[in-house]
Amino acid sequence: MSLIRIDRLLSDMGLGSRSQAKEWIKKGQVQVDGCVCRKTEQKVDAGIQEIKLNGRIVCYEEYVYYILHKPAGCVTAIKDKKNKTVMDYMPKECRKDLTPVGRLDKDTEGLLLFTNDGKLAHQLLSPKSHVDKTYFAKVKGKVTSEDVEAFMEGLDIGDDKRTLPARLMVRKSGQVSEVEVIVCEGRFHQIKRMFQAVGKEVIYLKRISFGKLVLDNTLKVGQYRKVKKEDILDDCK
């Protein structure tokens, strides 16, 4: 990896603020390859050199990946003056450059990916990538085979273009239907608008998969988990 300032490395790994890292270095609490480091501007290669803080090895990761089981009622944002954000559920020690990939509506729950890997985030969100996203929904009204066909053909939801073909699978049909929908786009309120186009209303929405990532029962609402890059997309590089 490329060289990085020692104070930034410590801060990036969530061990403390940049100013705290500088204080540790000045007090001789940081070692590089067994030697005390007292220069905050010293650059290191964390892939080769051994970094210690108070005798404990600091393992540096250039890119990190987390998934969160987002609860309903919080917004997908780094900061918000009025609402609780998804960042409130992430560990305090997580990377400061960590951001959510895409967004889920405030009242939508489910799988949300976080990373500081901008290249991968762009790849996942690019319309050209056609990354599948699966949602479970409860819908007011009976979902029919005609609706299944309409979703597959693409719907006019008020945008310049019709939606791309989407797979609609009916799990339960009745006054309140239960369905799964697989889309490869990420338009604003897309699932809700697609059902509005066929005369129905989504009353509950949960994202259960994103690319290769699947939200399993072990990750409860509000919990997060670290994942590996290869767990996210088959062809990510």
Image (spheres, grey):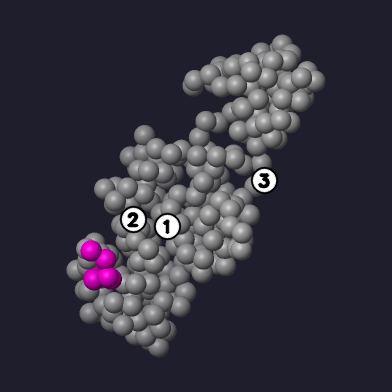
Cα separation, mark 2 vs mark 3, equals 30 Å
User: Element under label 1?
Assistant: strand
* Side (left or right) of 177 relative to 184: right
For label 3, the crowd category at 10 Å Cα-Cα, with few meaning under 14, some 14 to 19 and many 20 or more, is few
Q: Quadrant of residue 13?
A: top right
* Outermost residue to the left: 153
Precedes in sequence: disc 2 or disc 3: 3
Cα separation, mark 3 vs mark 1, equals 25 Å
Residue 90 lies, with reference to residue 109, above or below; the image says: above
Q: Which residue is nearer to you in this view: 88 or 64?
A: 88
* Outermost residue to the right: 27
* Side (left or right) of 5 relative to 65: right
User: Element under label 2?
Assistant: loop
For label 2, the crowd category at 10 Å Cα-Cα, with few meaning under 14, some 14 to 19 and many 20 or more, is some
Cα separation, mark 2 vs mark 1, equals 8 Å
Say which residue label 3 marks. 92
In the rendered image, residue 150, in percent from the top left (x then y), is placed at 22, 74
Precedes in sequence: disc 2 or disc 1: 2
In the rendered image, residue 112, in percent from the top left (x then y), is placed at 49, 54
Task: Name the dominant secondary structure of the magenta segment.
Answer: loop
| Magenta stretch encompasses residue 156 | yes
Tag 2 near tag 1, CB within 8 Å: yes
Say which residue label 1 marks. 209
For label 1, the crowd category at 10 Å Cα-Cα, with few meaning under 14, some 14 to 19 and many 20 or more, is some
Residue at (33% x, 76% y) in the render: 195
Residue 47 lies, with reference to residue 96, above or below; the image says: above
Say which residue label 2 marks. 132
User: What residue span does the magenta drawing correspond to?
Assistant: 155-160
In the rendered image, residue 170, in percent from the top left (x then y), is placed at 34, 75
Residue at (61% x, 59% y) in the render: 81
Residue at (26% x, 48% y) in the render: 128
